[in-house]
Image (tube, rainbow, N blue to C red):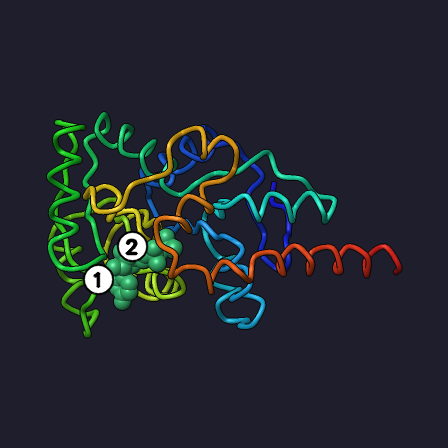
Amino acid sequence: MRNEIMGVSFDNITLDEAIEQGAALARGPGFSYVVTPNPEIVNLARQTKEYEDILNGAGLVLPDGIGVVYAAKILGCPLKGRVPGIDFATGLLARLEVSGQRLFLLGAKPGVAEQAAANLKEQYPNLVICGTNDGYFQDSTPVVEKIRAAGADVVFVCLGAPKQERWMARYGPDTGAHLMVGLGGVLDVYAGNVKRAPEIWQKLGMEWLYRLIRQPSRIGRMAKLPLFLVDARKARKKEGSR
Ligand code: UDP
């Protein structure tokens, strides 16, 4: 079941259910992609119909961010909870290690995907990482070819939003992969360049604050988040007065 939040239809599922469904999509036979919108991404979609359609066309739309969960509550269509992209990805890694399916890592600055692959291989010795590519390419054609030649089943696409969602929708079907997951800065975390918030911060829904303290330059992006909740309240009031 999907709950519509400000134009984007989110899957109302738990993390475990999401991993289960992701693993099923990875087995094919077709192609699908997973998006993990936070309030910033939903705001972008509200401005661009084409981007909104790409998000709603995903096989799984996961609420990555406490702001989306709060907005859902305000709108009267609560979600089961937050499903952070990185937790979904990590759950999927364990599944891929068992199934033997092939994973390709795409994105981040040169060298980061390779470092992430090396770290993941230590943690998941049987995981098959069939290739990597940085995220600063000009021409997509050789990248599509590289993924195809590597025989990837699953691709983690870490180009930042909205580039990664557009890239998956546009080029994903040509790569022969079954599943692509748009994951923002996750390769930087796997590579050990960016630290994730300690678990207690995550549990309290304060991961955004931790990131802000570590990277104060994100303040401009985050300042828009309270406005998102104000907009949700306005949308609810409008609905109520109809
Ligand atoms: N990135 C990329 N290609 C680009 C722009 C960005 O590979 O053209 C990478 C960037 O190096 C970083 C990730 O995309 O690893 C975006 O990280 P950010 O923290 O902004 O994403 P978020 O998790 O906030 O969506």
Check mark 2 vs ligand 1: CB closer than 8 Å? yes or no: yes
Check disc 2 and report its element: helix, strand or loop: strand
**Relative depth, front residue between 140 and 148:** 140
Residue at the location (29% across, 54% down)?
157
Q: What residue type is disc 1 on? A: Gly
Q: Is residue 17 left or right of residue 93?
A: right
Q: CA distance from mark 1 to mark 2?
A: 7 Å
Q: Which residue is mark 2?
A: 158
Check disc 1 and report its element: helix, strand or loop: loop
Check mark 1 vs ligand 1: CB closer than 8 Å? yes or no: yes
**Picture quadrant where residue 160 is located:** bottom left
- Tags 1 and 2 touching, CB below 8 Å: yes
Residue at the location (14% across, 52% down)?
132
Q: Ligand 1 quadrant?
A: bottom left
Which disc number belongs to residue 135? 1
Residue at the location (58% across, 67% down)?
46
